[in-house]
């Protein structure tokens, strides 16, 4: 596998290529990544909804969700949180802050659209009907809990999440075979899921699915029967209570890790001379 120094050298060029890619290509790959992460969220909810032990539920989700990022990397899809590593390219001056910002905005919008469409398809296809709407109630419960986080807590949970996600991206890109890539991805992603950290693109699915589900009377009633207070679940809380602070935290965590890797592992001119 690539050493950390080799990864930084490789990624500074990859980041340049990402920022120079045609907008339409990046946008379509971002929609695809939003779909893939949404499918990871759907599978995690489906596997965990009947678990009464929260620790077991988190471990189950932590073992399944890494497959979503694995497929993102295998297919070359564009994920907002992973693309925060373009900070390496900015620091190495192979791209510019403006080009990085443009990439992140396009990818963020594409991820959102992919998550929005996926949430709508999951809810309105009847996938949440399992166990007499218990899966729907659980989906709403997860969305409510995310829309009830204090702003500062959401920022910190976002920072912790994207440090781990970007380490997973590093691990996935540092290997050249499928098994090695998956091994490099699974542990950091499992850590963030089991730890309950906050990922803005995953939350686009989790909360949007809950928002669509709560509009269906039988789903809302199933949630209320479980004691879920659905009053906190609305689009305003989605955008300003969860998505905004989590995105801020994800950017800080991802760009911060990129800067840390560049500072510690960039190939200095003195090292080039000795080679």
Image: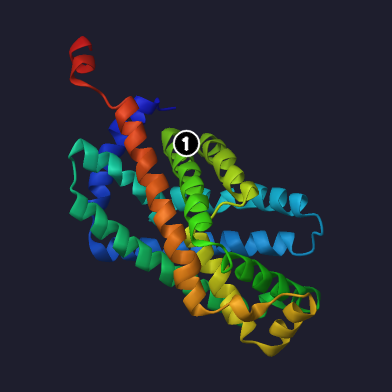
The residue depicted at 51 percent of the width and 57 percent of the height is 154
Residue indicated by mark 1 = 171
The residue depicted at 43 percent of the width and 38 percent of the height is 170
Which residue is situated farthest in the bottom direction here?
Answer: 217
> Would you say 178 lies left or right of 57 here?
left
- Position of residue 60 relative to residue 256, above or below, is below
> Would you say 162 lies left or right of 5 here?
right
Let me know if residue 181 appears in the view.
yes
Q: How many marks?
A: 1
Name the quadrant containing residue 2. Answer: top left
**Looking at the image, which is closer to me, 37 or 167?**
167
Asked which secondary structure carries label 1, the reply is helix
**Looking at the image, which is closer to me, 242 or 119?**
242
> Would you say 172 lies left or right of 216 here?
left
User: Residue 142: x percent and y percent?
Assistant: 65, 66
Name the quadrant containing residue 231. Answer: bottom right
The residue depicted at 67 percent of the width and 53 percent of the height is 61
Q: In the rendered image, which quarter contains the C terminus?
A: top left
- Position of residue 135 relative to residue 126, above or below, is above
- Position of residue 242 relative to residue 250, above or below, is below
User: Residue 263: x percent and y percent?
Assistant: 30, 29
């Amino acid at each position: 596998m690539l050493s950390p120094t080799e990864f930084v050298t490789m990624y500074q060029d990859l980041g340049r290529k990402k920022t120079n890619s045609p907008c339409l290509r990046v946008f379509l790959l971002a929609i695809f990544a939003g779909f893939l992460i949404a499918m990871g969220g759907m599978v995690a909810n489906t596997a965990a909804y009947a678990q009464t032990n929260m620790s077991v539920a988190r471990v189950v989700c932590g073992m399944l969700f890494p497959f979503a990022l694995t497929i993102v990397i295998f297919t070359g899809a564009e994920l907002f949180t992973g693309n925060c590593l373009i900070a390496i390219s900015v620091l190495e001056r192979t791209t510019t802050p403006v080009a990085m910002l443009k990439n992140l905005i396009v990818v963020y919008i594409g991820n959102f659209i992919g998550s929005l469409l996926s949430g709508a398809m999951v809810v309105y296809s009847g996938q949440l009907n399992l166990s007499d709407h218990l899966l729907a109630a659980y989906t709403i419960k997860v969305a409510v809990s995310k829309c009830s986080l204090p702003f500062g807590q959401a920022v910190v949970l976002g920072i912790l999440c994207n440090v781990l996600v970007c380490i997973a991206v590093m691990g996935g890109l540092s290997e050249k075979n499928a098994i090695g890539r998956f091994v490099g991805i699974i542990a950091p992603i499992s850590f963030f899921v089991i730890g309950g950290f906050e990922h803005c693109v995953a939350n686009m699915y989790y909360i949007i699915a809950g928002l669509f589900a709560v509009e269906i009377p039988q789903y809302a009633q199933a949630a209320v029967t479980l004691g879920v207070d659905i009053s906190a679940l609305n689009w305003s809380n989605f955008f300003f209570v969860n998505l905004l602070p989590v995105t801020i935290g994800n950017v800080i965590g991802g760009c911060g890790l990129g800067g840390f890797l560049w500072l510690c592992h960039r190939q200095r001119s003195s090292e080039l001379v000795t080679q």
